[in-house]
Amino acid sequence: MKAHELRDLTLTELKARLNDEREVLQNLRFSKSVTGQLENPARLKNHRREVARLETVIKEKSSAE
């Protein structure tokens, strides 16, 4: 999801999405450590970026209030 789309969501929705993304990222890291490889290693990068994007938007909304 793009940053401008995330800015339309409420703070609680953003935090819920952040928790979901962190859980997916943790599962990907776990499966990589167990098997030693992933089907699509680019997913790690995409989810890390999504977590950073969500944290940025949450911080922007929190400081605006």
Image: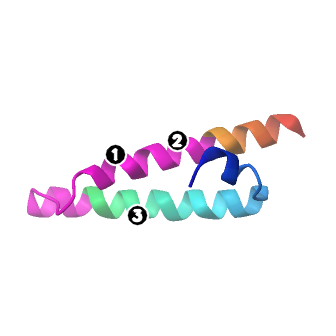
Q: Quadrant of residue 34?
A: bottom left
The residue labelled by disc 2 is 52
Query: Which residue appears at 25% of the width and 60% of the height?
Result: 30
Along the horizontal axis of the image, is 19 left or right of 31?
right
Query: Which residue appears at 50% of the width and 49% of the height?
Result: 50
Q: Which mark is residue 24?
A: 3
Judge the density around disc 1: few (<14), some (14-19), many (≥20) Cα neighbours within 10 Å: few
The residue labelled by disc 1 is 45
Closest to the observer, 54 or 1: 1
> Element under label 1?
helix
Mark-to-mark CA distance, 3 and 2: 14 Å
* Proximity of marks 1 and 3: CB atoms separated by less than 8 Å: no
Q: Residue type at mark 1? A: Lys
* Precedes in sequence: disc 3 or disc 2: 3
Query: Which residue appears at 34% of the width and 45% of the height?
Result: 45
Magenta stretch: give its range: 30-55
